[in-house]
Amino acid sequence: MPRPHSQTVTLTDVARLARVSVATASKALNDRAEVAPETRRRVLRAAKELEFQPNILARGLILGRTGTVGLLTDELAGRFAFPVLLGAENALGNSQMSVLLCDARGDAIRRRHYIRTLVARHVDGFIVVGDRNDVRPSLSRDIPVPVVYVYGESDDPDDLSILADDRGGAVLAAEHLISLGRRRIAHITGEEAYRAARDRVTGLRSVLDDAGLPLMGDRPFYGEWTQRWGRQAAHILLSAHPDIDAIFCGSDQIATGVADALHDLGRRVPHDVALVGYDNWELFAAECRPPLTTVDLNLQQLGTDAVAHLLEALDGDRRTGIIRQPGRLIIRDSTAPASTRP
Amino acid sequence: MPRPHSQTVTLTDVARLARVSVATASKALNDRAEVAPETRRRVLRAAKELEFQPNILARGLILGRTGTVGLLTDELAGRFAFPVLLGAENALGNSQMSVLLCDARGDAIRRRHYIRTLVARHVDGFIVVGDRNDVRPSLSRDIPVPVVYVYGESDDPDDLSILADDRGGAVLAAEHLISLGRRRIAHITGEEAYRAARDRVTGLRSVLDDAGLPLMGDRPFYGEWTQRWGRQAAHILLSAHPDIDAIFCGSDQIATGVADALHDLGRRVPHDVALVGYDNWELFAAECRPPLTTVDLNLQQLGTDAVAHLLEALDGDRRTGIIRQPGRLIIRDSTAPASTRP
DNA sequence: CGGAGTTCCGAAAACGTTTTCGGCCATGCT
DNA sequence: AGCATGGCCGAAAACGTTTTCGGAACTCCG
């Protein structure tokens, strides 16, 4: 099987051209001491001239470090894994590492299979990205290298999990609404099965309680993570409580649906009803009428941080526990101070 | 650096347990002839007992085949690379291959860097995913292994490019509208700089010409790929040509904006104006009011096909040229026969 | 019983690197 | 001069696998 062009140039070729031994060539290229400056120069020049690229397979075989990490996702097609992936890929690329991508598609068998092949490939570490932020069984038992869990929390406190702070994000949104003078706040969100949804409710409730305010409708409106549900819930909510002056939504999609419904009902946003979304999914948040105030989870940063912690673990100082990354409030046109009428 | 558990078990261990030489163990595990059935069984049993996983680095070093392919994208965050990635990852996983993911982010330097490191990692092949479907300079000169270009066409006819058939997709949409009795058809689309936009216009025009129908407004409405532009263009278009009875849009996002505008203008979809989108981006197409008839490019299949062709190339029969994968029409509620009035 | 053929196995080379360790040479010191 | 020191280099081992090839043992036939 002849390589089309560039009959792969090996360290032996470099050594020959520089008139040194492979050992010396290796040392020169790896910035080790014990090689005279002049010799090092000769080797470097030879390497450059031949466009030498070390064979990483051989290096990995010897050193055990392959410069790759396995990125294992549960459901890449979902909304959340992807930004994390982007951040992680970027950070790894900056550290001269490569990403081996594996999407288990929520299938446990598939996941086991991927873990085996990644381990067989001698990845230096794992990043495990959950598709929802529920607690999930630790995989670290089967993995002989450092693992960092992102977005989805591992059930083993000896693992390191990096999560978005949903509770805190909801607090930001709620405090924002209250500071604008809103007093009759409702909450429309997605499926109660999602821990993210429940955490946000907790955050919202704590702020409302502290302020002595009610949650309109007495409960959060759990439903689907869709615009359709947003529209539907808004209709129900407003017919029961016409005096609502703010709605905090569990996602930008839901908020977009709510905005549509409010528009149809003749309520002005933000004048009559202030609206806050969640996720800062630009596609929806920025294109909504009006553009949405929302909470940005900064998922990409989550991926970046995961890589940073993984690299630290590779260097020997391993952390454990849970890191919650705060979100931040993005203020657009869907919120404004309450109109001052009694 | 002691491996926490499972002190990696090597072929030597298996051989020892099976009381054969490494050579024989290797042959037994690789289904080669020249090994007695009984011996093979012994080796297999030993391998299973020790949970032996061959070290792929060593194998790759010898055989040249590493079982990995490099997936190089221009802009992973964009709309199109991602579904292709999903399809490719899936197909590769099914073939026991792994994906090394690299996102060049549209930066040529970064791209060169990634190519070098992927080549150094001895990937067996490349899949290059464009972010727009313009023709782009071939990278194959720098790559000593098979390359398949997906979505974005290579300028070298000796390469293999797998593309979505935008012209054909537009033909599907146009013929659908005409078959419904629509006669006054307009086209709102994205930036003219995108070849995809221009190709669709070509397809639409050819169908309209054949049917002796005009393109309303005399030209396609090029703009941005956003809902906002859809709304804006719809207003312009309908004030100039109130009798329009169908709008074909360059994307589902644009179509969603158009639907909003038509709603505001009191036009009923599909009764007064039929609406066709493009991309079948479920997030928009299915959630639109009404749900959109649209053209599905089947990008995931594009990724799957790319892998199939790459594997063929690895087996020796390399194809060249351009393969255009047809789209298909997804009919939802935004199109219906024209009302029968003179 | 002898030879030819067949079946099966293992020693050894090979892949491209890194690392260890011994040796050479020059220098400096006594 | 003799000796220790230190700087620099290269031979060789090691990593885990696949492949080649020689040879042992067995079978079959005359």
Image (cartoon, coloured by chain):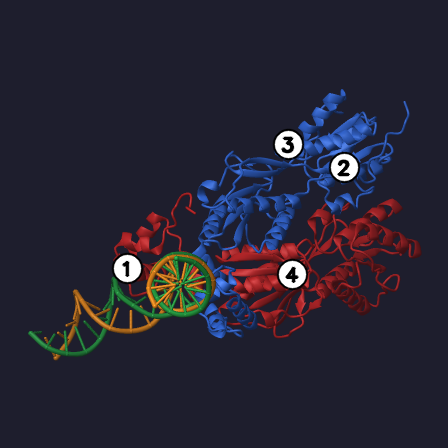
Chain colours: A blue, B red, C green, D orange
The residue tagged 1 is B21
**Of helix, strand and loop, which one carries label 3?**
loop
Query: Can see residue B110?
Result: yes
Q: Position of residue B56 (x, y in %)?
A: 44, 58
Mark 3 vs mark 2: tell me if same chain. yes
The residue tagged 3 is A192
Q: Position of residue B301 (x, y in %)?
A: 61, 58
Q: Position of residue A88 (x, y in %)?
A: 61, 49
Chain holding disc 2: A
Mark 4 vs mark 3: tell me if same chain. no
**Of helix, strand and loop, which one carries label 4?**
helix
Q: Which amino acid does the dot numbered 4 rest on?
A: Arg
Residue A208 numbered tag: none
Chain holding disc 3: A
The residue tagged 4 is B110
> Disc 2 and disc 1: Cα gap in Å?
70 Å
Nearest the viewer among A33 and C9 is A33
Q: Tell me what residue is drawn at x 64 percent, y 54 percent.
A: B82
The residue tagged 2 is A231
Residue A137, relative to residue A341: is it above or below? below
> Disc 4 and disc 2: Cα gap in Å?
44 Å
Q: Nearer the viewer, mark 3 or mark 2?
A: 3
Query: Can see residue A105?
Result: no
Q: Which amino acid does the dot numbered 3 rest on?
A: Glu
**Of helix, strand and loop, which one carries label 2?**
helix
Q: Are marks 3 and 2 in contact (CB under 8 Å)?
A: no
